[in-house]
Image (cartoon, grey):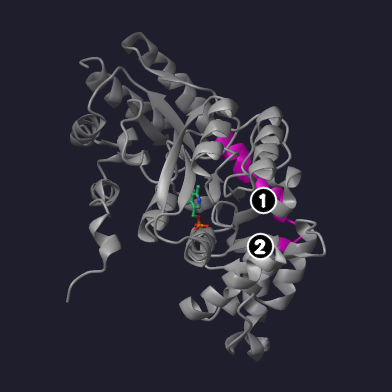
Amino acid sequence: MQLATPFTRMKSSFIREILAAAQDPDVISLAGGLPDEKTFPVELLKPTIDQLTSDLNLFQYGPTQGYGQLVGHLNKRYQLPEHHKLLVTTGSQQGLDLIARAFINPGDKVVLEAPSYLGAMQVLNFVQADIVPIAQNVEGPDLNVLEQCFVRHQPKLFYAVPDFHNPTGLSWPLATRQAVAKLCLRYQVTFVEDAPYRPLRFTGDTLPMVSSFCPDQALVLRSFSKIASPGMRVGAVSGPGHWIDPLIKVKQGADLHSSLPIQAMLLGLLEHPGFEQHVANVCQLYRGRYAVLHNALKHLETFGCFTQPIEGGMFVWLTLPECDTFTLAKTLLDQGVATVPSDVFYSGQKGVSALRLNFTNSSPESLKEAVDRMADVIKLL
Ligand SMILES: Cc1ncc(COP(=O)(O)O)c(C=O)c1O
């Protein structure tokens, strides 16, 4: 049987290759985007898990929009306006997929930061969106370029990760957030704000979301993968009700609904008095690891490498002297360090030479050792 057309546009997954090689115990993996499993809040989940079987309704089919009590809790937690709705999804990745399937026709223009989240490019390529890249600077997109892009392409969506971006780790300052919202309102472009790393701030002040400045022109994707567990696969998408309703219809066809027992587990976790402390502990652990990696990477500056400081999240973006980043990543893998080359995060254009480094799932000793191994390779560039 012949594959559907969108498959012909999919790149062979170099990342999957790297992640498979990273299973080797001799390889230090800075490649994945994994939380440290020691942070999984199993103790906080236990009381709810013990209670689960006393509610048989949780083991029945349920509403597509999500487990009612969880939906209610999240509405309050995010202080959604009356006319907004929230849909519980199987990870925030599903939210993105539903948005693409509900709203994008082949050839529709969608603006994406360059570099951008690989999973977003995959989803958008699958619905045959016409991806328009916008370069990402330290302070987010250049606003003049973004405006020209909106005028020229009249895109349907602008998808971005303003908090602790994947892959760069950078966050947009307040002025960028306000200005992007203004442009989205002026040119009627829907802003899709993907915020899986937002709770992982380990320094500086929390900034308002972009969508808070254009609530009726935005859809917001949330994830519990980084503060609860990725294996639970719970996320949410929220926005104006008339945009969430079509997503509910598409989800019905996709999986009827996300697992009710898991949604009940998440609710128990979010309502547990120890939850906020749990998130603070995760941030503290990651702050320490980031500091170790950041300090170690300073030694690579003599070889023309550079990193921007970050305030949270899971990734550091190490820019390099101009090179073939795929070849470099392969050489590093041979030396026992898995990283992700920058090229995979660009859609069809050549980006800067860089590596994405994850610091949340390696011990401080491993992080230092990884940078020592990297130095031996990078000094020869
Ligand atoms: C920017 C971004 N969006 C979405 C996701 C998917 O998250 P989830 O596990 O909630 O599906 C990830 C996962 O790493 C991500 O980096």
- Measure how far apart labels 1 and 2 are at the Cα level: 9 Å
Q: Which residue is mark 2?
A: 44
Can you say whether 189 is above or below 300 in the image? Answer: below
Q: Is residue 217 visible?
A: yes
- Is residue 276 on the magenta stretch? yes
Q: Residue furthest top?
A: 302
Quadrant the C terminus occupies: top left
Q: Quadrant of residue 372?
A: top left
**Few, some or many residues within 10 Å of mark 1 (<14, 14–19, 20+):** some
Q: Measured from the top left, where is residue 69 in percent x and y?
A: 74, 74
Q: Secondary structure at mark 1?
A: helix
- Mark sitting on residue 278: 1
- In the image, the segment drawn in magenta is 270-287
User: From the Cβ of disc 2, is ligand 1 less than 8 Å away?
Assistant: no
Q: Measured from the top left, where is residue 215 in percent x and y?
A: 73, 51
* Residue at 66% across, 52% down: 218
* Residue at 79% across, 65% down: 83
Quadrant the N terminus occupies: bottom left
Q: Is residue 280 visible?
A: no
